[in-house]
Image (tube, grey):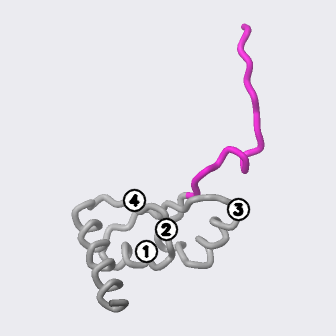
Amino acid sequence: MGCKIELRPRAAVWQVIGMHHAAASATATAAAHAVGKDVYVWTANTPAMVRAAITAAADAIVTDFPAMATEAVHEAWSQCHAASG
């Protein structure tokens, strides 16, 4: 057959951890970041879910409603900068 397959430990292969929005927390994200993994929160389909993913320090947010999520991110950004400035 002539094919070569290299198997590596799963932890070495995974670069991203997909986390359901209900499980996302700052503690869980910090644990993933501590081992060099990004956290993608799915499926954040309400503004509250998007805000929770932001609070949890998610690296990416997966949603079925990108316009809503974009608006929620912009609102969170504006609130953060208004409070700090």
Amino acid type indicated by mark 2: Ala
Give the x, y percent position of residue 18: 54, 58
* Disc 1 from disc 3: Cα separation: 20 Å
Residue 58 lies, with reference to residue 81, above or below; the image says above
- Answer few, some or many: residues within 10 Å of disc 1's Cα (few below 14, many 20 plus, some between 14 and 19): many
Give the x, y percent position of residue 85: 33, 90
Magenta range: 1-17
Horizontal side, residue 55 vs residue 17: left or right: left
| Mark identifier at residue 54 | 1
Q: Earlier in the sequence, mark 1 or mark 4?
A: 1
* Disc 1 from disc 4: Cα separation: 12 Å
Residue under the image location 62 percent in, 73 percent down: 30
Where is residue 38, by image quadrant? bottom right
Residue under the image location 53 percent in, 64 percent down: 19
Which residue position is annotated with label 4?
Answer: 62
Amino acid type indicated by mark 4: Val
Which residue position is annotated with label 2?
Answer: 58
Q: How many marks?
A: 4
